[in-house]
């Protein structure tokens, strides 16, 4: 028995994996193991011999089982130590920075404008940025040789040789969407159309691509009074303070009468403050839709009338958020974008306030 003990205890202590331990278990205390076979011999012994050999064999079996369990645990511990050495992790290290983008002020302001006009019942309409000569000019009562065409600094698309049709243009304003939505939806209608427009111009307040939002409301008895209320309502919601407006008589081929609209501001201390002081800042063109324009959109001017306006989105973004140079809007300078950009989850809604 001592021989058996010596042999197995030593072998178990030297086993280096679980498979070897299992082999030893079978050889010692398995059904046909050496210790089990010895136990079977107990029956052949005299009662005196059995009284000594029985408990001794049981003790040996327990001892071998205990050694197997202990060795198994030791092997598992050693394996874990080995893993911990290689898979070590310092949870006190600062986390890796994750780059987070921001919402561009133009996108933010477009959302703000849309939310405010949506509340007044205006739907959003869209049109193509490459327009035909007809939608950008003629349908808006700007015939071929009208001086307004020259004033617009239009970008013309290239034309194939021999094609004598007027070239397509990059739309110079969002007004062509007026015609497109009249054609598509008829009257009555109430839409705004935010989007990109293009003119060949470049300085601190002009870029060759910029953004406008067009407004159009047509019904039986819409007047300039409705226009004024809607715009004042808009500016007050947008700037978060009551803003006086000033309507100056003006001229656009597509509206009659026409007005340019200024908002109240002060220029004290080198910064523009909207809604206070007694200076004025021009922010949009507007008027009553010209009968020729209604006709071009298949709407009977004897039955319907309405107002339209076109406002610079970039311009009102600069005013609200104190951004001095328009050109920086489109330079993709990350420092500028991080500074003036908005958090991605900062979605403008009327109930939460259109901006932080
Ligand atoms: N389309 C004009 C512009 O770009 C603005 C405007 C729109 C004026 C609608 C009157 C009515 O300057």
Image: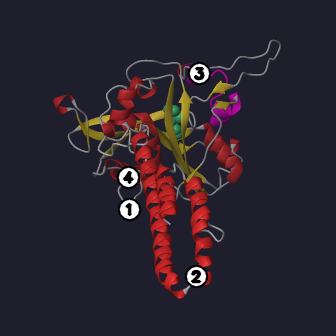
Quarter residue 326 falls in: top left
Mark 3 and mark 4: span between their CA atoms?
34 Å
Of badges 4 and 2, nearer the viewer stands: 2
| 110 in relation to 350, above or below | above
Query: Closer to the N terminus: mark 3 or mark 4?
Result: 3
Mark 1 and mark 4: span between their CA atoms?
8 Å
Of badges 3 and 1, nearer the viewer stands: 1
Range drawn in magenta: 133-150
Q: Check disc 1 and report the residue beneath it.
A: 351
Q: Are marks 3 and 1 in contact (CB under 8 Å)?
A: no
Instruction: Describe the element under mark 1 as helix, strand or loop.
Output: loop
* Nearer to me, 76 or 21: 21
Q: Check disc 2 and report the residue beneath it.
A: 45
Q: Are marks 2 and 3 in contact (CB under 8 Å)?
A: no
Residue at image coords 40%, 47%? 81
Quarter residue 269 falls in: top left
Q: Is residue 149 visible?
A: yes
Mark 1 and mark 2: span between their CA atoms?
96 Å
Q: Are marks 1 and 2 in contact (CB under 8 Å)?
A: no
Query: Closer to the N terminus: mark 2 or mark 3?
Result: 2
């Amino acid at each position: 028995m001592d021989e058996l003990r010596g042999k197995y205890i030593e072998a178990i202590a030297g086993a280096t994996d679980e498979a070897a331990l299992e082999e030893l278990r079978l050889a010692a205390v398995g059904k046909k193991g050496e210790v089990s076979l010895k136990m079977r011999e107990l029956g052949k012994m005299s009662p005196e011999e059995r009284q000594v050999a029985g408990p001794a064999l049981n003790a040996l079996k327990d001892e071998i089982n205990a050694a197997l369990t202990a060795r198994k645990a030791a092997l598992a511990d050693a394996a874990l130590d080995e893993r911990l050495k290689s898979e070590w992790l310092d949870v006190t290290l600062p986390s890796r920075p994750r780059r987070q983008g921001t919402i561009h002020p133009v996108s933010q302001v477009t959302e703000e404008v849309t939310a405010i006009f949506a509340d007044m019942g205006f739907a959003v309409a869209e049109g193509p940025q490459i327009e035909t000569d007809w939608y950008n000019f003629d349908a808006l009562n700007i015939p071929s040789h009208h001086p307004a065409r020259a004033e617009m600094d239009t970008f013309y698309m290239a034309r194939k040789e021999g094609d004598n049709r007027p070239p397509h243009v990059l739309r110079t304003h969002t007004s062509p969407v007026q015609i497109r939505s009249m054609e598509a939806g008829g009257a009555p209608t109430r839409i705004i159309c935010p989007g990109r427009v293009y003119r060949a111009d470049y300085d601190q307040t002009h870029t060759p691509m910029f953004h406008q939002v067009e407004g159009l409301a047509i019904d039986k008895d819409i007047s300039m009074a409705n226009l004024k209320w809607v715009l004042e309502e808009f500016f007050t919601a947008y700037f978060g303070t009551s803003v006086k407006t000033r309507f100056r008589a003006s001229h656009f081929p597509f509206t009659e009468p026409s007005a340019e609209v200024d908002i109240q501001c002060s220029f004290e201390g080198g910064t523009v403050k909207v809604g206070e002081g007694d200076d004025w800042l021009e922010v949009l063109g507007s008027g009553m839709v010209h009968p020729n324009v209604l006709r071009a959109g298949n709407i009977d001017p004897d039955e319907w009338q309405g107002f339209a306006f076109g406002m610079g989105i970039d311009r009102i973004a600069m005013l609200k958020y104190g951004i001095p140079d328009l050109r920086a809007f489109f330079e993709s300078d990350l420092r500028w974008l991080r500074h003036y950009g908005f958090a991605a989850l900062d979605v403008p809604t009327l109930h939460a306030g259109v901006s932080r």
